[in-house]
Amino acid sequence: MQQAHDYLAEVDELSNLLRDQLESIFFKKTLFKSWTVNDVIGHLYMFDLAALKSLQNEDEFAKIHSNVSSHLDQGMSLLESQYPFLDELNGKNLFERWYSNSRKLGTAFACADPSVRLKWFGPEMSAKSSITARQMETWAHGQEIFDALGVGRTPHDRIKNICHLGVATFGWSFANRGLKVPDHIPYVRLISPSGKIWEWGDSGSPSSIKGKALEFAEVVTQVRNVQDTRLTSEGAIARKWMKIAQCFAGQPENPPAKGSRFTVPRENFGV
């Protein structure tokens, strides 16, 4: 699956950013709920391992699922639920563990049947959807680290997978909040990092979203507030969607406040 290779490319990009950093960097706070770099890598590692086990060993996946669910049921936050799993693993040791497992995950999914159904923390999903979700998580959480270190990141066309996931979760973004799902999905027309035009939906729709693919990906992953982008949203449905878009599973989350997720001028991010 190409999606597996795209995931591995995200892993390598984040790895290249962190590999030669000082140990102290891993304890630096990001602008995402004050998670540290260490927290972000721990989060990615735990769920990457769960994804690998869901493909290779359902019993091992069930153990991870049970432990995480039990901690959440006890009132722990998602972040707190990873602490027992990590058992004080942190810093560069955690980084190396994450990277090693990530390579195994990408390699395993590259050879997998894209349509095989896999268990997850919500509904089952296809292997193709699972590895796309892992790319999305790595890209989105990775941005928190790029931001925290004040480093710009060059966008690549592999974010098309994330944009597609954003469109595919249109209904979920509403239903997850107990809202009625609109009777039509807006037309989405995006300009890729390489200048290609990507389109979803009917161009005759009364609602539309147009702009750069990078900014659409940032909004649906809640990396940026839509007001911090140049996306144009026409129609009430499109405007509402961009305010609540959420392409990841879990409880409803709100996007960051306007202007809260930048540490260096926007132009430094290649937009």
Image: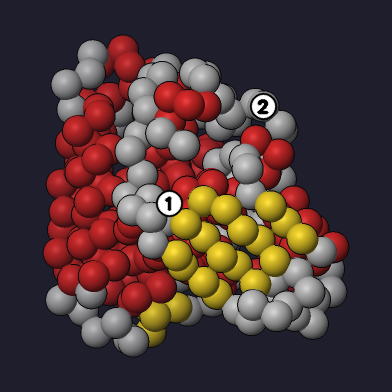
Q: Is residue 225 left or right of residue 79?
A: right
> Which image quadrant is residue 8 in?
bottom left
In this figure, which residue is indicated by the disc labeled 1? 137
Secondary structure found at label 1: helix
Residue type at mark 1?
Glu
- Residue at image point 74% right, 51% down: 243
Residue 66 at x, y percent in the picture: 47, 62
Q: Answer whether residue 176 is visible to the viewer in this image.
A: no
Q: Distance between the Cα atoms at labels 2 and 1? A: 22 Å
> Which image quadrant is residue 233 in?
bottom right
Q: Answer whether residue 163 is visible to the viewer in this image.
A: yes
Nearer to us: label 2 or label 1: 2
- Residue at image point 61% right, 58% down: 210
The label number, if any, that marks residue 94 in the structure image: none
Q: Is residue 255 left or right of residue 18?
A: right
> Could you tell which of marks 2 and 1 lies nearer the N-terminus?
1
Q: Quadrant of the N terminus?
A: bottom left
Residue type at mark 2?
Gly
Residue 149 at x, y percent in the picture: 38, 20
User: Residues at badges 2 and 1 in contact (C-beta under 8 Å)?
Assistant: no
- Residue at image point 33% right, 87% down: 115
- Residue at image point 52% right, 20% down: 265
141 lies above or below 134: above
Task: Estimate how packed mark 1 is, as few (under 14), some (14 to 19) or many (20 or more) residues with alpha carbons within 10 Å.
Answer: many
Residue 127 at x, y percent in the picture: 33, 76
Task: Estimate how packed mark 2 is, as few (under 14), some (14 to 19) or many (20 or more) residues with alpha carbons within 10 Å.
Answer: few
Q: Is residue 21 left or right of residue 208?
A: left
Pick the residue in front: 223 or 267.
Answer: 267
In this figure, which residue is indicated by the disc labeled 2? 259
Residue 3 at x, y percent in the picture: 29, 67
Secondary structure found at label 2: loop
